[in-house]
Image (tube, rainbow, N blue to C red):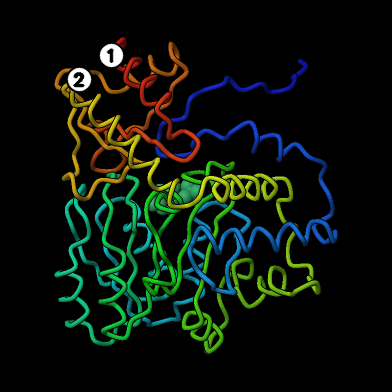
Amino acid sequence: MTITSFHPPRRTLMGPGPSDVSDRVLQAMARPTVGHLDPSFVGMMDETKQLLQYVFQTQNELTFAVSAPGSAGMECCFANLIERGDKVIVCQNGVFGGRMKENVERCGGIAVMVQDDWGTAVDPVKVEEALIAHADACLLAFVHAETSTGAQSDAKTLVGLAHKYDCLTIVDAVTSLAGTPLKVDEWGIDAIYSGSQKCLSASPGLSPVSFNQRAADKIQNRTSKVQSWFLDLNLVMGYWGGEGKRAYHHTAPVNCLYGLHESLVIVQEEGLENSWARHHKNHLALRDGLEQLGINFIVPEQDRLPQLNAVTIPEGVDDALVRTRLLNEHDLEIGAGLGSLAGKVWRIGLMGHASSQKNVDFCLNALKLVL
Ligand SMILES: *Cc1c(COP(=O)(O)O)cnc(C)c1O
């Protein structure tokens, strides 16, 4: 048997991620691999850091991309900021809040859960009650854009509450970054992680993160070593931070970083505010078209994410069959429901490069034909 080269089909990716990667980003990834300590590559990493500071809207020195997907950025935040016995208030209104709890506990922390219904935003009143009831908590963790439900939470208010009660914050911005307003410095977010494959439309495999001085101080003042060698920020920073004196820590995924760099250049060219506005505009167009088909959103209007549209599967419709036909007949991927929403919703992504009027029309037409 001879196995030959793999040629994937060309799909339109309108699920919960990865989103469509533009030819421009794919071409950037096809450029020659250089050594990861090559001066030209180090220069590109410095630019990537500046571009990440721009999309996060932060001056944080400790801003870089973890060499692994969003889940590793999540782990990086929790592993570095939590020491054994630390109490962490974790908000859960979907799948990813549950993963935060798992992270807290694996780091030896104690998770205090604040639960909200799936499809709703995190309730700041409940968060304040938890902060008052647990005065010994040192961290508040929540998901800004819950990809499993399409709900957006009020990050600015939640961070303000955490600080009022002397807690630092860990924010999941995997799906929000570049798709919906997010201002790390203005809102005072202490630690944040994202992913390359959602609204940045780079290939999966990198997790932009950023830590402010308060978070960096907590990490530097740890009494115990970070249990993960790979994610220990004290070591990683020697690699990303060292202004020309870059030391070997691990081999960066060189071509993947070319792609992230190009995707960030594209956001910079468009302008971050324009990117947010485009996501909003295309969401409204999709909403209007879906409503005409009698398909309704599960999230109340004011809390909807423009980049992730979770809608109820119409009565009597075969969920898996529709998604299979969209894929086979239209090369269109939309997302299934996750967790307690499995079989009940579809998740239609309009993320990054995939957020266009053309894709809105394409998706609505394909759905019409299949239904
Ligand atoms: C996709 C996603 C993650 C996980 O990112 P991976 O790149 O799949 O590891 C975490 N949180 C949220 C909100 C996400 O949407």
The quadrant in which the N terminus is found is top right
Which of the pair 218/102 is nearer the observer?
Answer: 218
Q: Is residue 88 left or right of residue 17?
A: left
- Label 2 close to label 1 by CB (< 8 Å): yes
**Could you classify mark 2 by the number of other residues whose Cα lies within 10 Å: few (under 14), some (14-19), or many (20 or more)?**
some
Element marked by disc 2: loop
Q: What number is the disc on residue 368? A: 1
Where does residue 184 sit, x and y in percent of width and height? 43, 67
Where does residue 26 sit, x and y in percent of width and height? 66, 35
Residue 341 figure quarter: top left
Where does residue 208 sit, x and y in percent of width and height? 55, 58
Q: Residue at x 75, y 36 (%)?
A: 30
Q: What number is the disc on residue 106? A: none
In the image, is the residue at mark 2 within 8 Å of ligand 1 by its beta carbon? no
Q: Is residue 363 left or right of residue 120?
A: right
Where does residue 361 sit, x and y in percent of width and height? 36, 21
The quadrant in which the C terminus is found is top left
Residue 37 figure quarter: bottom right
Measure how far apart labels 2 and 1 are at the Cα level: 8 Å
Find disc 2 in the rendering and name its residue.
293
Q: Is residue 312 above or below residue 40?
A: above
Q: Is residue 103 left or right of residue 2?
A: left
**Could you classify mark 1 by the number of other residues whose Cα lies within 10 Å: few (under 14), some (14-19), or many (20 or more)?**
few
